[in-house]
Amino acid sequence: MIEAAYTLAKELQEFLSSSGVSTWLCSAWEGEESRAQANDTDLILSIGGDGTILRAAQAVVPVQTPITGINLGKLGFMTELSADEARDKLPVLLAGEGWTDERAMLEAELSPTDQEPPRIFYALNDVVVSRGAIARVVYTEASIDNEPLTTYKADGVIVATATGSTGYSLAAGGPILHPQAKEFLLLPIVPHLSPAYTLVLPSTAVVKLRISTAHQATVSIDGHINLPLSSGAVITVKLSFNTVRFLRTHPKTSFYSSLEQRLKGKQ
């Protein structure tokens, strides 16, 4: 746990305890421990940056415990409070005066080529299929609703939620969606002699990606669950029934007013 985050967490824990609120404290990187405690929790305070929130989101699925992010990072698209305003705003949240920002998630089913059973993962930001350590393109056969689309010859392919549209997807040339939109994005990473456009897909779409490569590829879920892929592996991605809920205090219109500042790395 980063020292600044731990210091602030202890300070807020003491403040909440003095107000009669029962609390627990652990690192977002301790996934099993945080998942075990999230089930009986009314609110999670995620102290750090967007990466910390992505781990917190994994901990609450599928119970939908609301999250309030306190930003110690540089960008903080998903965070709500600065470190300086956290203590002043906590009583507002505890009094139930905030509002709920519900975000869509993706469900990704990984079907490996061997005898292993399929595995299910959930992503708040994105599911990324990409090349591994060897710097060679990966061939990815993409279909939507069982209709063939194309074979991407690229460094990889991104399937991103509206929340993830301001992350890796944006860096790869994708558009920005309103964070509460249910549509999601499909786009290649540095395509070579293959389609370079982004598709905005409806919430009902089912995307299937089949990997064809002479070397190892990888699948990344929200940037911190990373698994090797062999040729022939299939990843099926669709909108999940699960969502992530953020408890917020700032006005609902603040996304547009703060968008340019946040893209420039300002708070």
Image: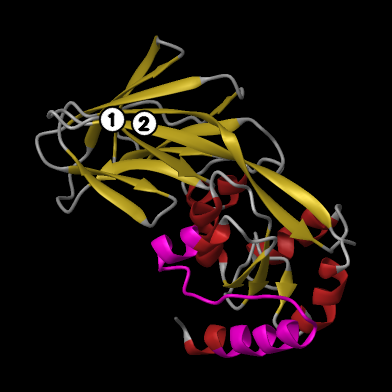
Q: Is 175 above or below relative to 77?
A: above
- Alpha-carbon neighbours of circle 1 within 10 Å: few (<14), some, or many (≥20)? few
Residue to which mark 2 is pinned: 109
Residue to which mark 1 is pinned: 118
Q: Main secondary structure of the magenta part?
A: helix
CB within 8 Å, label 1 to label 2: yes
Q: Residue at x 40, y 61 (%)?
A: 32
Q: Quadrant of residue 111?
A: top left
Q: Residue at x 40, y 10 (%)?
A: 146
Q: Position of residue 235 (x, y in %)?
A: 33, 30
Magenta highlight range? 7-36
Q: Is 215 above or below relative to 134?
A: above
Instruction: Out of 248 and 201, give the one closest to the viewer.
Output: 248
Q: Check the image and name the residue furthest to the left.
A: 214
Q: How is the image coloured?
A: secondary structure
Instruction: Out of 257 and 71, give the one closest to the viewer.
Output: 71
